[in-house]
Image (cartoon, helix red, strand yellow):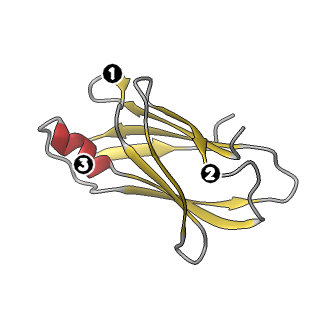
Amino acid sequence: MSYISAHVLDASAGVPATGVSVRLTDADGSTVAESRTDADGRVGELGPERLDPGVYQVTFGSGDYFAGRRVDSFHPQVSVLFTVAADQAHYHIPLLLSPYSYTTYRGS
C-alpha cells in the first residue's frame, strides 16, 4: 500500500472529481509521484510504501478540472503542505472542492 492516498469531491456538482491531476513533491520540489483521480475521485496509490520524515506537498489540478467542465474557477491549483512523521503508517488527503473554495484535512 502506498504511504499517501487522496480523494477529491466536487462539492458544487455533488460528485467525485474524476480525472484531477495529483502530484506529490518533497521539500526540494522534486516530484515523488503523479497520478489522476479515478471514477470515484480517488488516488489509492500515490508514491512509495514509505517516505522519509519531512515536509511534502500534494498539488491538485483544480483549474484544469473545472476548465474541462467549462466552469470558471478561482484556484488554478490547490497545494497542501503536510509533515510526515517517522511513526506514521499512512496519510490520506481528502479535498472538498468547488470553483471558488476548498477544504482539506487529514483523513484516515
To which quarter of the image does residue 9 belong?
Answer: top left
89 relative to 92 in the view: left or right: right
Q: Mark 1, residues whose alpha carbon is within 10 Å: few (<14), some, or many (≥20)? A: few
- Residue drawn 25% across and 50% down? 63
Residue at the far bottom in the pictured view: 28
Q: Position of residue 79 (x, y in %)?
A: 45, 58
**Figure check: 83 above or below 102:** below
**Residue ID for mark 2:** 47
- Give the alpha-carbon distance from disc 1 to disc 3, as whole Å: 18 Å
Amino acid marked by disc 1: Gly
87 relative to 76 in the view: left or right: right
To which quarter of the image does residue 78 belong?
Answer: bottom left
Q: Earlier in the sequence, mark 1 or mark 2?
A: 1
**Figure check: 27 above or below 89:** below
Q: Secondary structure at mark 1?
A: loop
21 relative to 81 in the view: left or right: left
> In terms of depth relative to the viewer, which is nearer, 40 or 93?
40
Q: Mark 3, residues whose alpha carbon is within 10 Å: few (<14), some, or many (≥20)? A: some
Quadrant into which the N terminus falls: top right
Q: Secondary structure at mark 2?
A: loop
Q: Is mark 3 in CB contact (under 8 Å) with mark 2?
A: no
**Residue ID for mark 3:** 64
Q: Position of residue 32 (x, y in %)?
A: 58, 61
**Residue ID for mark 1:** 14
- Give the alpha-carbon distance from disc 3 to disc 2, as whole Å: 22 Å
- Residue drawn 81% across and 45% down? 89
Q: Nearer the viewer, mark 1 or mark 3?
A: 3
Quadrant into which the C terminus falls: top right
- Give the alpha-carbon distance from disc 1 to disc 2, as whole Å: 28 Å
- Residue drawn 34% across and 29% down? 11
Q: Secondary structure at mark 3?
A: helix
Q: Earlier in the sequence, mark 1 or mark 3?
A: 1
